[in-house]
Image (cartoon, rainbow, N blue to C red):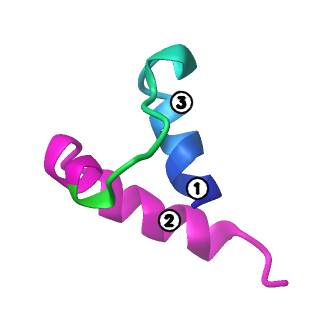
């Protein structure tokens, strides 16, 4: 979920992030989340 944390940190101050993030809430709030997540994971090197 590192990609989600980075995605959110690019859009709001880190101090405003809740201690636990519900991915359904992220999807509901950010129309481009799933597309951006797919781009991030496709660009990440495989372990």
Magenta range is: 25-47
6 part of magenta stretch: no
Mark 3 Cα shell of 10 Å, populated few (<14), some (14-19), many (≥20)? some
Q: Position of residue 44 (x, y in %)?
A: 71, 69
Residue indicated by mark 2:
39
Numbered disc in front, either 1 or 2: 1
- Alpha carbon separation for disc pair 2 and 3: 17 Å
Residue most toward the front?
A: 19
Residue indicated by mark 3:
9
- Alpha carbon separation for disc pair 1 and 2: 10 Å
Tag 1 secondary structure: helix
- Alpha carbon separation for disc pair 1 and 3: 10 Å
The residue positioned 34% from the left and 63% from the top of the image is 35
Residue indicated by mark 1:
3
Please name whichever residue, 26 or 40, is drawn nearer the observer in this view of the structure.
26
Tag 2 secondary structure: helix
31 part of magenta stretch: yes
Tag 3 secondary structure: helix
Q: Position of residue 1 (x, y in %)?
A: 57, 61
Q: Position of residue 13 (x, y in %)?
A: 50, 15
Instruction: Find residue 43 and report its image quarter.
Output: bottom right
Instruction: Find residue 11 and report its image quarter.
Output: top left
Asked if labels 3 and 2 touch by Cβ distance under 8 angstroms, the answer is no
């Amino acid at each position: 979920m590192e990609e989600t944390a980075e995605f959110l940190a690019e859009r709001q101050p880190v101090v405003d992030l809740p201690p636990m993030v519900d991915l359904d809430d992220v999807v509901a709030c950010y129309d481009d989340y799933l597309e951006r997540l797919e781009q991030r994971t496709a660009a990440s090197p495989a372990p």
